[in-house]
Image (tube, rainbow, N blue to C red):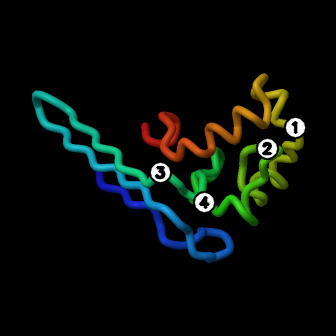
Amino acid sequence: MNWKSPKTCELCQEKLFGFAEINSVLTDSFSSITVKESFLVDFVFCKICQSVICKESCFDIQTGYCKPCAEDNRVTDISEQNPFGIINETRLSDDILSSEIVF
């Protein structure tokens, strides 16, 4: 599997800054996964639709989803799902490649 982050937001088409890459090699005897990412990025993954979206206008920090998914699912408070709340969500969104997205 080879994946590279897109250059534009999948919702608003604004230019994204930073990059991420995932390369994996699977053979009979081993598996190798290489993850490269820039230190600063201005995009995140929506946990529902898996879209790469900009933090500035398409990400709903209250839910941790893109705005269309947040509206469709009528999720308004992340504290019910995550006891660490918005602080943890911001940290997780900055860690662009989480295990739930990669695997």
Decide: few, some or many residues near mark 4? Use Cα within 10 Å; few <14, some 14-19, many ≥20: some
Q: Between 63 and 15, which is closer to the camera in this rendering?
A: 15
Asked if the residue under mark 1 is in contact with the one under mark 3, i.e. CB atoms within 8 Å, the reply is: no
Decide: few, some or many residues near mark 1? Use Cα within 10 Å; few <14, some 14-19, many ≥20: some
- Report the Cα–Cα distance between label 3 and label 2: 24 Å
Question: Mark 3 vs mark 2: which is more N-terminal?
Answer: 3
| Callout in the foreground (3, 2) | 3
- Amino acid under disc 4: Asp
At which x and y percent is residue 3?
36, 56
Compared with 5, 83 (above or below) is: above
Reading the image, the residue beneath label 1 is 77
Q: Between 93 and 63, which is closer to the camera in this rendering?
A: 93
Reading the image, the residue beneath label 4 is 42
Which residue sits at x=65%, y=63%? 54
- Amino acid under disc 2: Thr
Question: Mark 2 vs mark 1: which is more N-terminal?
Answer: 2
Reading the image, the residue beneath label 3 is 39
- Amino acid under disc 1: Asp
Q: Quadrant of residue 5?
A: bottom left
- Report the Cα–Cα distance between label 3 and label 1: 29 Å
| Callout in the foreground (3, 4) | 3
